[in-house]
Image (spheres, rainbow, N blue to C red):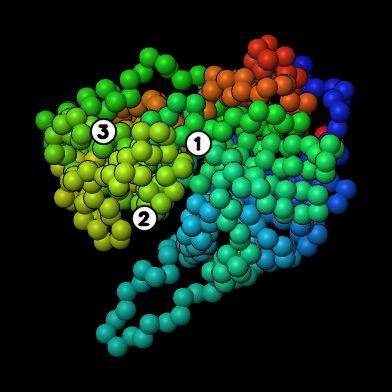
Amino acid sequence: MSAARSHVADDGAQNIGATLEFHGAAGEVTGSCTLIRTAKANILVDFGMFQGAPADEARNAIAPKIDFASLDAVVVTHAHIDHCGRVGMLPKLGFRGKIYCTTATHELLGRVMRSSARLQRARFYERSSGSAPWSRALMPGEAPGPAPEFPEAQRLFDTPEVRDTMDCIEGVPLDREVKIAPLVSLTFRNAGHTAGAASAEFSIGVGAARKVLYFSGDLGPERGALLAPPHRPARADVVVVESTNGERRRDASADTDQVLADIINEAATKKLKVLAPCFALGRAQLLVHRLARLHAKGLLHGLNVYVDSPMAVHGIESLYRNPEYLAPEPQRAVRAGEAPLWFPELHYVLSKRESMAIDRMVHGGVILAGSGFMDAGPIQRHLEESIDREDCLVLLSGYQPDGGFAWKMQRGADRAQFNGRTVPIRARTVRVEGLSGHADQDDLVKWFGGFGEKPGRVLINHGTDSARAALASRLTTEHGIACTLPKPLVPIEV
Ligand SMILES: [Zn+2]
């Protein structure tokens, strides 16, 4: 913390007349939730879930100490659970205003909330009865009974609340200014992070007194092959910036296409089953795009690729419908009616039955499945089926939380446990760089180079304390920017 404090700004900068309260993601990477108060309005930016250990997830049930009925608006930067996962709780908490997100995020948000509700229900049944309620057998003549009750007190939200929430959502195209509260307007800017992901640019006040408060949301890398680089604002009075990769620097020499080409070549020659744990919105699309490019160069060798995630498929379709999120070349292709995220060997797996079938079927093929951390979702089933086989290759990429399944595999775990059954790990792991949807430290520092004049205040959130301190140190050294590292629930006047 001493390094963090040494970069804390004094309050010499001219204030814009707002108070910020961080109810999550201050010193950590999940649970994004920030309250903006001005003299005339209260606005919430993101309402994400805490993720990770069970103790972190337990925090989701505790509603933040916010008067939700008094909020003028809620702004959602993108459809990742750590930013939007608790939006479905808003009606129950008394919120009656509008929820703003980009039109592309609007298309995805209902599905994300419904799948989150299903997951909560499944977890509840697992905890209370040790199994999911829909998997019991019925004897001849035995009538199907109702599913066990999922008590109101145990659930954050369920399908009816998702419907109520969807009624409140207003999708706004990128770069269109919309008034959302007295003396506050909002413009979404492309964040380059995933389909629909945006930074939120708030304009507060009127005339010459108008001030700009810029929330980065999650920012993508500066030079991605698939997605457009993040918008660089020319000026802002106050910037709240994420720092997920605030202390990481990408290996610039890593040639992602070549590494993938080698893996595919080996998989085709030796008939390997390649498991690629992916997040449905983000890495799945980045990987499909890279594989499509290999196909175009004749380097896929006819290997079948299965996307085992309906949400990932929606993410792909979303990019076709919203090409403004794409980098210049794939954007040109989509606008010309081409399909940069398609190749003949690409198959969408849309049901659990198909997912189970490909486990048995695939010898010499690639399966993309969630979750990216390998601790949940269909990837668990594929791992259980194949992790003890020498003809299986697990492709790891991006950030892995300490102590998790993927983290341990990368560090030489030799056995895995599935529902009490222990199996030896014979599958090989291989790490592929260049598939992260987040800006690294160099990207973030460069992003600040885009400001015509230095922002009055910079607050760093959405990162561990060491990531925030590392980024703050470089911003101070290279741009002369003093940074504030907000603490949870401590109001900051800006
Ligand atoms: Zn994100």
- Rendering quarter of residue 142: bottom left
Cβ of mark 3 under 8 Å from ligand 1: the answer is no
* Mark 1, secondary structure of its residue: loop
Q: Nearer the viewer, residue 142 or 243?
A: 243
Q: Extreme top residue here?
A: 477
Q: Nearer the viewer, residue 99 or 394?
A: 99
Give percent across and percent down for residue 175. Answer: 59, 43
Q: Extreme left residue here?
A: 269
Q: Is residue 277 above or below residue 477?
A: below
> At x 59% / y 29%, what residue is drawn?
232
Q: Is residue 343 left or right of residue 214?
A: left
| Quadrant of the image containing the N terminus | top right
Please name the amino acid that badge 3 sits on.
Answer: Arg
Rendered image: mark on residue 293 = 3
In 3D space, how far apart are the residues under numbered discs 2 and 1 (Cα atoms)? 22 Å
Q: Nearer the viewer, residue 265 or 138?
A: 265
* Mark 3, secondary structure of its residue: helix
| Quadrant of the image containing the C terminus | top right
Report which residue position mark 2 lands on: 310
Q: Extreme bottom residue here?
A: 141
Report which residue position mark 1 lands on: 192
Q: Are marks 1 and 3 in contact (CB under 8 Å)?
A: no
N-term-proximal mark, 3 vs 2: 3
Judge depth for marks 3 and 2 and give the one in front: 3
Q: Is residue 192 left or right of residue 215?
A: left
Give percent across and percent down for residue 367. Answer: 27, 44
Judge depth for marks 2 and 1 and give the one in front: 1
> At x 44% / y 48%, what residue is drawn?
322
Q: Is residue 61 left or right of residue 249?
A: right
Q: Dot 2: within a 10 Å radius of its alpha carbon, few (fewer than 14), some, or many (20 or more) residues?
A: some
Please name the amino acid that badge 2 sits on.
Answer: Pro
